[in-house]
């Protein structure tokens, strides 16, 4: 197969290259993902499969990171790993540091656990191996930080995939089919390995938190980015792909309905989730990403671009960080003594989570976003 860009391109931007730019519909999809995770973790019964929202995040991350890296390669002729990790650091680290510092301080002042355990949790989060702490000991957490395991899995993906893409594209150019086969191969290997490792409820934490058993959704997202790039490069002009509209509607409906059913009915410890649900949720999300971008007038494109969902997508990282600590506060003994109805505690958790996320986004994330933009230059 001819590469989309040669190892040493004669022009920085080859014919047919169309950068993704800002896609509000993907913000909306991210907004749905964070809301179903929030609802599940706050105990909303009809979102018992809301934990699969994490796999929606994984698929979105795989798609966006792959698109970002390959667009840089097509635009500049190279992938700068130093600039990539600098941007990731400025995007993710500041808000995480604030959360971990607050959780550690709270745990130490309340004497919930010893300083050694708090120090281990802090270090594991800052060095991105907290997922392996979850895999080894699901109770090894303080201050409502157990959910940060997924950030570690994503960081491991960033390191692995960015290095692979930089190496392959330097030697062979942007060869879409081999890269697609590589991404799908890793996704399938992770899904099959999860089945091999599965022994029942005694190792749920190992499967749930291990990097090796959670790579299928994120690499399906990466494969989707390669598919989109190949389709867009072969279709001149901004119009949707001619054959896409009827296929988009069918694929979109199947993906949306399937994902909704999984989120509604999948218990969090069901073998279905651990043996196949993670990957199916990732695949459905990947298909929704593709159909939404290929056809701007698809059934879900409009709702996903709605102002509310887009805003929740924009604050999704901070909302994901803060919703578990807020739940911990509202379910503490101090609030239990007030004798408030569960509905009031739930409403308080939701409002406090959104408020904390908004503060984190506008005061921390946006401030460092300006530094990211300088780093991109």
Image (cartoon, rainbow, N blue to C red):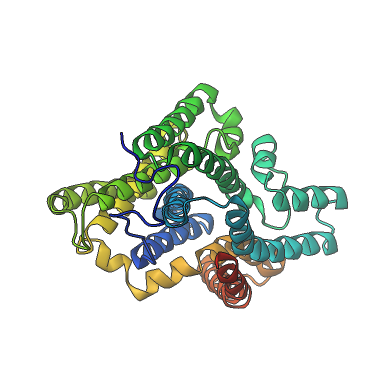
**Residue placed most toward the observer, 160 or 263:** 160
Query: Picture coordinates of residue 15 (x, y %)?
Result: 29, 55
Q: Which quadrant, please, contains the N terminus? A: top left
Q: Name, please, the residue furthest toward the right.
A: 115
State the image quarter where residue 245 is shown: bottom left
**Residue placed most toward the observer, 172 or 199:** 172
Identify which residue is drawn at 60% across, 76% down.
Answer: 359
Identify which residue is drawn at 53% across, 55% down.
Answer: 41
Query: Picture coordinates of residue 169 (x, y %)?
Result: 47, 41
Specify whether residue 282 is in view: yes
**Residue placed most toward the observer, 310 or 11:** 11
Q: Is 301 left, or right, of 362 in this rendering?
A: left
Q: Is 106 left, or right, of 244 in this rendering?
A: right
**Residue placed most toward the observer, 132 or 377:** 377
Query: Picture coordinates of residue 196 (x, y %)?
Result: 51, 22
Identify which residue is drawn at 69% across, 63% down.
Answer: 99
How many numbered discs? 0
Relative to 317, say whether 195 is above or below: above
Specify whether residue 340 is in view: no
Q: Which quadrant, please, contains the C terminus? A: bottom right
Query: Picture coordinates of residue 224 (x, y %)?
Result: 35, 45
């Amino acid at each position: 197969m001819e590469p989309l860009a040669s190892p040493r391109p004669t022009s920085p931007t080859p014919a047919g290259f169309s950068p993704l730019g800002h896609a509000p519909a993907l913000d909306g999809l991210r907004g749905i993902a964070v809301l179903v995770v929030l609802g599940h973790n706050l105990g909303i019964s009809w979102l018992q499969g809301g934990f699969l929202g994490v796999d929606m995040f994984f698929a979105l991350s795989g798609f966006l990171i792959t698109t970002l890296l390959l667009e840089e390669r097509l635009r500049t002729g190279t992938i700068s790993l130093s600039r990539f990790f600098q941007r990731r650091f400025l995007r993710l680290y500041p808000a995480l540091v604030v959360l971990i510092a607050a959780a550690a301080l709270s745990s130490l002042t309340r004497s919930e656990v010893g300083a050694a355990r708090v120090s281990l949790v802090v270090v594991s989060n800052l060095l991105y191996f907290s997922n392996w702490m979850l895999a080894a000991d699901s109770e090894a957490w303080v201050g409502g930080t157990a959910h940060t395991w997924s950030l570690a899995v994503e960081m491991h993906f960033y390191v692995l995939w960015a290095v692979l893409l930089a190496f392959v594209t330097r030697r062979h150019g942007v060869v879409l089919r081999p890269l697609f086969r590589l991404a799908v191969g890793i996704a399938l290997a992770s899904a099959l390995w999860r089945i091999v490792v599965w022994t029942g409820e005694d190792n749920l934490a190992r499967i749930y938190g291990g990097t090796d058993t959670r790579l299928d959704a994120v690499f399906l997202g990466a494969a989707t980015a390669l598919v989109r790039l190949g389709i867009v490069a072969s279709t001149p002009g901004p119009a949707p792909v001619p054959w896409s509209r009827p296929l988009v509607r069918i694929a979109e409906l199947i993906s949306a309905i399937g994902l909704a059913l999984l989120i509604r009915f999948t218990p969090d410890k069901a073998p279905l989730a651990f043996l196949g649900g993670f990957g199916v949720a990732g695949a459905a999300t990947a298909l929704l990403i593709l159909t939404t971008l290929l056809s701007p007038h698809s059934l879900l494109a409009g709702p996903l671009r709605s102002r509310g969902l887009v805003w929740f997508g924009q604050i999704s990282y901070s909302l994901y960080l803060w919703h578990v600590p807020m739940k911990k506060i509202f379910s503490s003994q101090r609030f239990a003594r007030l004798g408030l109805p569960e509905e009031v505690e739930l409403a308080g958790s939701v409002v406090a989570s959104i408020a904390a996320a908004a503060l984190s986004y506008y005061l921390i994330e946006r401030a460092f976003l300006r530094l990211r933009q300088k780093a991109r230059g």
